[in-house]
Image (tube, grey):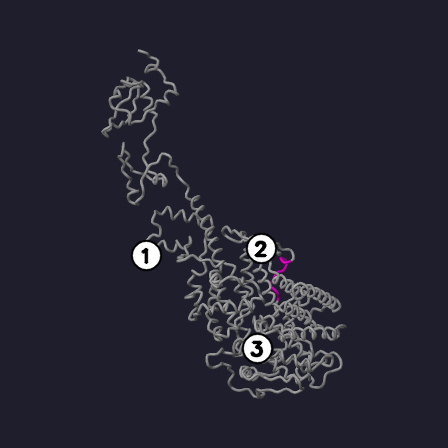
Amino acid sequence: MSWSAGTAFDRPSAKHSRTNQTSPSNTTPEDVDGTLSAGRKRKRSSVVSEGGEVDEGSVRGGSVSGGSPLVGKQQRHQPGVKRACNDCRQQKLRCNVVVGPGEQYKACDRCIKHKLHCSIDNDFKRLGKRAAHEEMARELELCRAKLAEYEALGITLPNEERTDSTFAASYGSCCANGQPAFPWPNEAAASWSLLDLSQGYRELPPTSYPSITPGASPKTIRNVTLAEDQIKDLYAIYFNNFHPFLPVLNPEWTYQSYYSLHPLLHWTIIAVAARRYDAKPGLLVEIQQPLEEMLWTTLSQTPQIYHVCKALALLCTWPLPNSSTSQESTMMLTGCMFQLAMQYGLHRPSHAQDFSRFRVDLREEDIADRLNTWAAVNIVAQMVSTGNGQPPVSRWAWYTYGLHLDRMKSELGIRCQIEKFVDTVTRTLFTMQRDHIVEVDQAQRGLQIDMYARELNEMELTIMSTRGTTIETLYLKAAALHLRLSAFFDKPTAPNYLVDLRNVYIAASSLLTVATELPPEYFSYMPRYIEQMMLAGAVTLLKLLNSFYASHVDIPSGRTLFSKTVSALRRLSVRSNDLPQRLAEVLAQLWQTSGASEQKLFNGDAGLAKPGPDESLQLRVRCRSSLSLLYDAIWRWRQQVGQEGRILLDRAVEHPTAIASASDTMARNTPQPPLTLPSSTGLGMEGGELDMSWDSFGGNAVFDPLSWALDGNLQFGGLGLGGADALSGFQV
């Protein structure tokens, strides 16, 4: 017998031991010697026989009867049997799976309970849930971006059934009807929560908020329902006529696309177009109240999408009709619009990630849209501030040193140049100082005005040589009038006083001529800012034609232009007894009260014009920037007509005052107000019309967007109008 394999007492080599390992199923009870040598500690081993019975034998040292002495060592180092299935190993849970030889296999209780496939794989490895879920979330975002791109192009899937399923929506449905939202255990829900924390909370789409859009849809708001043809007609009216004045939207998008961006934007477009929708004249009145409710509900819940700024910009450019600026919310909406734009990071259009709680991937068109929206926000904010005589809230440093300016629309770029110039003039010349306390260097002020005039002329030449349209010309004329209205803040003793008055008369006449001669496709769709500047120009003509300066101008042509302006303002009305109608009537009454180029209104004497400059053109209201001229005239009208004239204003609107432009006499369709006041002071209108109570806000009507009060330090004495403070009877 050869002992080349060694004895039972020899240490087997590691190489031989590794290559001769056997599985427990190949070992039979007859191969195992149940005896152990004395002094050796034995280890129990379970061996499964062919019949399925387990025979527990004793292995001695290393010798096995009838076989190689290495078998004992091999059994001591064989791997243990897997005792958990794949799913239980993934969840790190205890498993009672039974694995037998051959086909004998009993699934664990957990897999049976949850109807899972119970299996054991030798190459199974646990997977991290967070990594898998993040990958799925990235794929979902990519799919949504592609879907939005196709929808923007008008491509829709047939029989499309989409649900607004978001991570946040799963929280609300997890306990609905007492049933869990997940068919698997709570560990899966916990993994979703971890994913939300890693990527940020996902906001619901605006159309899924029932509190914002109660019963609203692309065709219905409250009790107003429009047909699809009507909506398309309204969109056509907006993009063909209103859009050129503020080109911030994309004319190629459908109304479904704008509604998906935000319902407020969709219905704002319809409301603006309804101002001139002849097919249904009462549509604007019907949707005004539901739209206002949607507006304030949206702002109260802090909208999370920057497209709301576009809707606010449209509402500030073409405000909803109102009878008193005391109730108008344009200034407040402008502040909300500007602050929301900065909260969304529109002032840094390419760095949206810095202002977001989750990852934002911007494309080139996204950056351009954010930049155009930011430009429109600043343009509208500047127009509203200038038109209401308030300090500007816009910021223009980005336009000088900002990035991506080449991606801005050319129309918005030209508007930014003009409004930036207006902002510079406001901050330099109209400093809101009390002119009776702070003396201004008249020589330096005159040099600044001349410098700005040259700058404006150069800008006008550049713009008109490149792309000069009617709209750009209109805004350039408004900027020129804004600059020249500073002449009314100068003293009569200033060396260039008469020259400044001539320039402001030319600027006012130029703006009014361009505005009144606009084609119908432009005039009826002008924004509120142009209307306010037309009012300032009309008051300029009114004051100069009824002052000592009347001898230096063509009075008949001035009267004709004033009459055309009042008629044009009345045509801008979109609703009975709204602001354009009321203010046009105020101008007509001011003109008649002035006495047709006699100084009955702006001068204490009723005689002819004085040969030299006097203080008849000095302003009492001096803290409303360039629009101080307009507010000053309104205060004088209140003093002139008295309480009775204010009460009968709504009746005068129905029967407007006529202005004779070709003669020195005036004709009036409404009777002169009596000297005694009636007992009734209300102005409520019958038939469901607006309540036009003129004195609902005391001394803060007619022009009072922010309930302003005159500064108590201003002294009104000695500025004409009889030489005394004729406004002392009005408490403000």
121 or 153: which is nearer to us? 153
Where does the image place residue 166, in percent across and percent down from the top left?
Answer: 42, 54
The residue located at (57%, 78%) in the rendering is: 570
Residue under numbered circle 2? 348
The first of marks 1 and 2 along the sequence is: 1
- Type of amino acid under label 1: Asn
Q: Amino acid at mark 3?
A: Arg
Mark 2 Cα within 10 Å, few/some/many (few <14, many 20+)?
A: many
Task: Report the disc number at residue 571.
Answer: 3
Residue 277, how many percent across, how many down?
51, 73
Res 245 → quadrant: bottom right
Quick check: 136 above or below 80? Answer: below
Is disc 3 placed on a helix, strand or loop? helix
Name the element at disc 2.
loop
Residue 595 falls inside the magenta stretch: no
Reading the image, the residue beneath label 1 is 177
Please state which of the two labelled residues, at mark 3 or mark 1, is closer to the viewer: 3
Q: Is residue 33 left or right of residue 21?
A: left
- Whole-number angstrom distance, CA of label 1 to CA of label 2: 46 Å
Q: SS of the residue at dot 1?
A: helix
The amino acid beneath tag 2 is Arg
Query: Any magenta on residue 398?
Result: yes
Residue 458 relative to residue 298: left or right: right
Image: magenta residue range: 391-399
Q: CA distance from mark 3 to mark 1?
A: 59 Å
